Image (cartoon, helix red, strand yellow):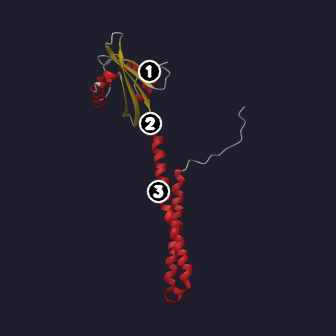
Amino acid sequence: VLANVAAGVVSADANGRILTINKSAERMLNIKAEDIIGKNYREVVGRDYVKAINGFLKDRSIFRRGFMVRQIRLSVENKTLTLLVSLNVLRDDRGKYLGLVAVFEDVSEIEKAQRMAAWREVARRIAHEVKNPLTPIQLSAQRLKKKYGEKVARDDGQVFEECTNLIINQVEELKRLVNEFSSFARMPASNPMTNNIIQ
């Protein structure tokens, strides 16, 4: 079971010696079981991670409750992983402390999807807020042009015409930009196709 679960599983004894590590943990952390089994975690992980692990262990509530769940960021080679780590205390029948089991899940993709959803929502709101005043501005410029265009033409009609046209054209350009921006907020359009599912 441990060999085939997607979650990484590492166990260590009461002195911090690593006892087991499954394939998922090897893959996530880019390490080989034969290189670390039997060694103390302090020899295997970097100094920063030793501090993080020691920080977990200093929290005495883990021994009282029997478990702890934390989200951590971990740099492995050239990528950063976001891991949901669950530490579970191992005890024998008499309650003697035997060690710890760490179960960690890579939630990097979930975090990325949540971030994308948040940006989509921001884009949608900005597009909505910007688009709202554009139509009244454009309509006002068109109304001014229609109502006062001929009257102003006698005095300074060219300037009035240029200014109202500029407002109308620039609002149109802004609307186009806002529409492009709001299209980012939408999910991609579906493209259904007929197919033979038997083949």
**What's the distance in space between the residues labelled 3 and 1, CA to CA?**
46 Å
Q: Which residue is mark 2?
A: 108
Ranked by sequence position, the earlier of labels 1 and 2 is 1
Kind of element beneath mark 2: helix
Disc 2 packing (10 Å; few <14; some 14–19; many ≥20): some
Q: Amino acid at mark 1?
A: Asn
Mark closest to the chain's N terminus, 2 or 3: 2
Q: Which residue is mark 3?
A: 126
- Give x and y (percent) for residue 83: 40, 32
Question: Which percent across, then down, holds residue 35?
Answer: 37, 20
Q: Which mark is residue 32?
A: none
Indicate whether 101 appears above or below 74.
above
- Quarter assignment of residue 111: top left
The residue where tag 1 is placed is: 22
Quadrant hosting residue 28: top left
Q: Relative to residue 128, is residue 10 drawn left or right?
A: left
**Residue lying furthest top:** 94
Choose between 71 and 2: the one closer to the eye: 71
**Nearest to N terminus: mark 3 or mark 1:** 1
Residues at marks 2 and 3, CA–CA distance in whole angstroms = 27 Å
Give, as a three-letter code, the residue at label 2. Ser
Question: Do residues under tags 3 and 1 come within 8 Å of each other at their CB atoms?
Answer: no
**Front position in the image: 141 or 174:** 141
Q: Quadrant of the C terminus?
A: top right
